[in-house]
Image (cartoon, helix red, strand yellow):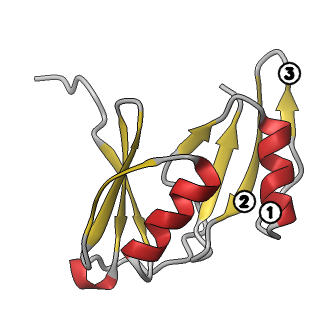
């Protein structure tokens, strides 16, 4: 039976509560639930699960690759906002006709991929 959707992406964090507030404030994600184990955030029908140490996840915060990408309306404004916080890792790359993107890091050092489509 084929899959019909991808349910969530998982990101290891040191504190689900603190990380959830960061993702809400910085990327505009909505918070569905928060506990000492995890936090579930969403934008539209897409989910992001932040997994804390109490969840038993074996991955440590500070992933060097992105578990998903964050689609934004204005990649330049998002870049500027993250650059102001010292979180940008790469310059904006890509092509305006195909896709523009850059890498940044969250407060736990996990790589985030930000794209315009």
* Residue at position x 58%, y 61% in the image: 65
Would residue 51 be found to the left or right of residue 111 on screen?
Answer: left
Q: In the rendered image, is residue 52 in sight?
A: yes
Q: Which mark is residue 89?
A: 1
Between residue 44 and residue 64, name the one nearer to us.
Answer: 44
Where residue 93 appears, as percent x and y from the top left, is 86, 40
* Residue at position x 85%, y 60% in the image: 83
Quarter of the image for residue 81 reads: bottom right
**Quarter containing the C terminus:** top right
Would residue 93 be found to the left or right of residue 82 on screen?
Answer: right
Where residue 40 appears, as percent x and y from the top left, is 31, 55
Q: CA distance from mark 2 to mark 1?
A: 5 Å
Q: In the rendered image, is residue 56 in sight?
A: no
Q: Which mark is residue 33?
A: none
Specify few, some or many for label 3: CA neighbours under 10 Å numbering under 14, 14-19, or 20 or more: few
Between residue 99 and residue 23, name the one nearer to us.
Answer: 23
| Residue at the spot of label 2 | 104
Q: Is residue 100 above or below residue 37?
A: above
As drawn, the residue found furthest toward the top would be 97
Specify few, some or many for label 2: CA neighbours under 10 Å numbering under 14, 14-19, or 20 or more: many
Under circle 1, the secondary element is loop
Q: CA distance from mark 2 to mark 3?
A: 19 Å
Q: Earlier in the sequence, mark 1 or mark 3?
A: 1
Q: How many marks?
A: 3
Cβ atoms at labels 2 and 1 below 8 Å apart: yes
Where residue 15 appears, as percent x and y from the top left, is 41, 80
Q: Earlier in the sequence, mark 2 or mark 1?
A: 1
* Residue at position x 71%, y 30% in the image: 116
| Residue at the spot of label 3 | 96
């Amino acid at each position: 039976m084929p899959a019909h959707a991808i349910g969530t992406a998982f990101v290891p964090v040191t504190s689900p509560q603190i990380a959830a507030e960061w993702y809400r404030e910085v990327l505009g994600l909505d918070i569905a639930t928060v506990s000492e184990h995890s936090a579930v955030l969403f934008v539209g029908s897409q989910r992001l699960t932040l997994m804390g140490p109490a969840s038993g996840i074996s991955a440590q915060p500070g992933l060097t690759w992105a578990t998903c990408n964050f689609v934004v309306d204005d990649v330049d404004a998002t870049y500027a906002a993250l650059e102001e916080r010292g979180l940008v890792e790469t310059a904006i790359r890509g092509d305006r006709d195909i896709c523009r993107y850059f890498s940044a890091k969250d407060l736990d050092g996990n790589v985030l991929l930000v794209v315009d489509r």
